[in-house]
Image: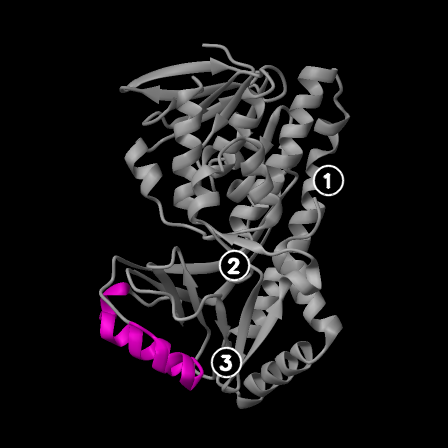
């Protein structure tokens, strides 16, 4: 088998890249280890930066988002028993869109398949060979090992995928920070407690009130990194969440049974470089951020912005400079997002039992929310730095 661009992974980054290239007449094949039902059911992020929204609109994956997505111009920081709103539209000129990654994935799969883009579900890639020449993706289909020769291979296969593992250890440099806590999250068919997101700092730990729609909510509480879902009943979760919110918010909360409950570990991770020969890394294959800053999916989309421009430049305009500079350009934005997510996480979570730690966080939040410059810093980073 032969194609121009082999893409490993059918998450939003791989699907978006395939669609952008298809619209310019560039052939792709996507190799996905899971079946379609599994991929379309994965519950992930729900906050889209304006740049990500515009990319989805550019490829025609915006019809349901425009109808059902929820634009947000601000969000609230809750601390010390009070709430302070960050007006993103005022301080950064735009807002974000509440539209789940699950929905983005479903829309892109439908569009790509309708246009004849080859998505090989249930076909795990097991190796990438000859990355310095014409790379070959080795994959399994119906139990048979097969090979696909490509001009370039795009590793969009996440933290545990084969792509990053293909880069030799003497070339790849990794940076990692493991946080001493996780997020216990519940998805429930209850109306959101507020029309915008609420990030809460509390002496008992962090909490987040989020949503997927006007009738479905996603809530989180900070928990020990070794905790387990089996330790929590629905009532225990709702009680703990209410303890960490201002009284008027807790009183207004509608509770209900879980549709899903899970614990997400928190880490910061970066792999450099994001290119090795004709293998390119994007998304979680190259970097992971704690979810506090809502950067994971959006950072993957910014990688795809740079990658698609570079590949289109190569095939349409016969230029190689954008491919050569991809890793350097993408990493500049990656590290700024890593910094913001680390900073926001450090300011909102409980790290130890020392009372001064919490009081210092409250003082910082009080300063930032009473300063025009402070609110601008938060808003500019939250809506996404320029591409």
Residue at 58 percent across and 33 percent down: it is 58
Residue 44 percent location from the top left of the image: 41, 50
Residue 6 percent location from the top left of the image: 51, 22
User: Foreground mark, 3 or 1?
Assistant: 1
Q: Which residue is mark 3?
A: 352
In this picture, which residue range is highlighted in magenta?
Answer: 229-254
Question: Looking at the magenta stretch, what is its main secondary structure?
Answer: helix
Residue at 55 percent across and 84 percent down: it is 358
Q: What is the tally of numbered marks visible in this picture?
A: 3
Residue 117 percent location from the top left of the image: 45, 20
Per the rendering, the mark at residue 290 is: 2
Label 3 vs 1, first from the N-terminus? 1
C-alpha separation, residue under disc 3 versus residue under disc 2: 18 Å
Q: Does the residue at mark 3 contact the one at mark 2 (Cβ under 8 Å)?
A: no
Q: Residues within 10 Å of mark 1 (few under 14, many from 20)?
A: some
Per the rendering, the mark at residue 137 is: none
In the rendered image, the residue lying farthest to the bottom is 355
Label 3 vs 2, first from the N-terminus? 2
Residue 247 percent location from the top left of the image: 41, 86
Q: Is residue 160 visible?
A: no
Q: In front: 118, or 133?
A: 118
Q: In front: 211, or 360?
A: 211
Q: Residues within 10 Å of mark 3 (few under 14, many from 20)?
A: few
Residue at 51 percent across and 74 percent down: it is 349
Whether residue 231 is in magenta: the answer is yes
**Residue 222, quarter of picture:** bottom left
C-alpha separation, residue under disc 2 versus residue under disc 1: 22 Å
């Amino acid at each position: 088998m032969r194609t121009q661009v082999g893409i490993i992974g059918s998450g939003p980054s791989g699907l978006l890249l395939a669609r952008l290239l298809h619209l310019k007449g560039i052939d792709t094949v996507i190799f996905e280890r899971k079946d379609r039902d599994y991929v379309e059911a994965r519950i992930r992020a729900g906050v889209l930066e304006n740049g990500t929204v515009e990319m989805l609109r550019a490829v025609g994956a915006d019809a349901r988002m425009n109808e059902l997505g929820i634009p947000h111009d601000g969000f609230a920081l809750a601390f010390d028993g009070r709430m302070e709103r960050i007006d993103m539209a005022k301080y950064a000129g735009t807002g974000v869109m509440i539209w789940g990654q699950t929905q983005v994935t479903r829309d892109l799969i439908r569009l790509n398949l309708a246009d004849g883009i080859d998505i090989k579900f249930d076909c795990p890639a097991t190796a990438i060979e000859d990355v310095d020449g014409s790379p070959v993706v080795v994959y399994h289909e119906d139990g048979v090992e097969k090979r696909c020769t490509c001009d370039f291979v795009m590793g969009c296969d996440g933290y545990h995928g084969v792509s990053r593992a293909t880069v030799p250890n003497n070339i790849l440099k990794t940076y990692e920070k493991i946080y001493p806590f996780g997020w216990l999250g519940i998805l429930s068919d209850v109306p959101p407690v507020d029309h915008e997101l609420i990030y809460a700092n509390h002496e008992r730990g962090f909490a987040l009130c989020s949503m997927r729609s006007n009738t479905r909510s996603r809530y989180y509480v900070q928990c020990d990194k070794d905790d387990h879902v089996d330790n929590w009943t629905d009532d225990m979760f709702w009680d703990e969440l209410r303890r960490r919110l201002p009284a008027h918010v807790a009183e207004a909360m509608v509770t209900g049974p879980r549709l899903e409950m899970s614990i997400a570990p928190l880490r910061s991770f970066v792999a450099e470089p994001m290119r090795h020969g004709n293998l390119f890394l994007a998304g979680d294959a190259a970097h992971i951020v704690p979810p506090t800053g809502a950067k994971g999916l959006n950072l993957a989309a910014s990688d795809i912005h740079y990658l698609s421009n570079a590949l289109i430049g190569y095939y349409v305009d016969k230029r190689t400079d954008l491919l050569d500079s991809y890793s350097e350009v993408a990493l500049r934005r990656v590290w700024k997002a890593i910094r913001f997510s680390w900073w926001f996480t450090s300011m909102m979570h409980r790290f130890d039992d020392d009372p001064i730690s919490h009081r210092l966080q409250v003082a910082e939040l009080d300063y930032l929310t009473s300063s025009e410059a402070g609110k601008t810093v938060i808003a500019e980073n939250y809506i996404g730095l320029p591409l």
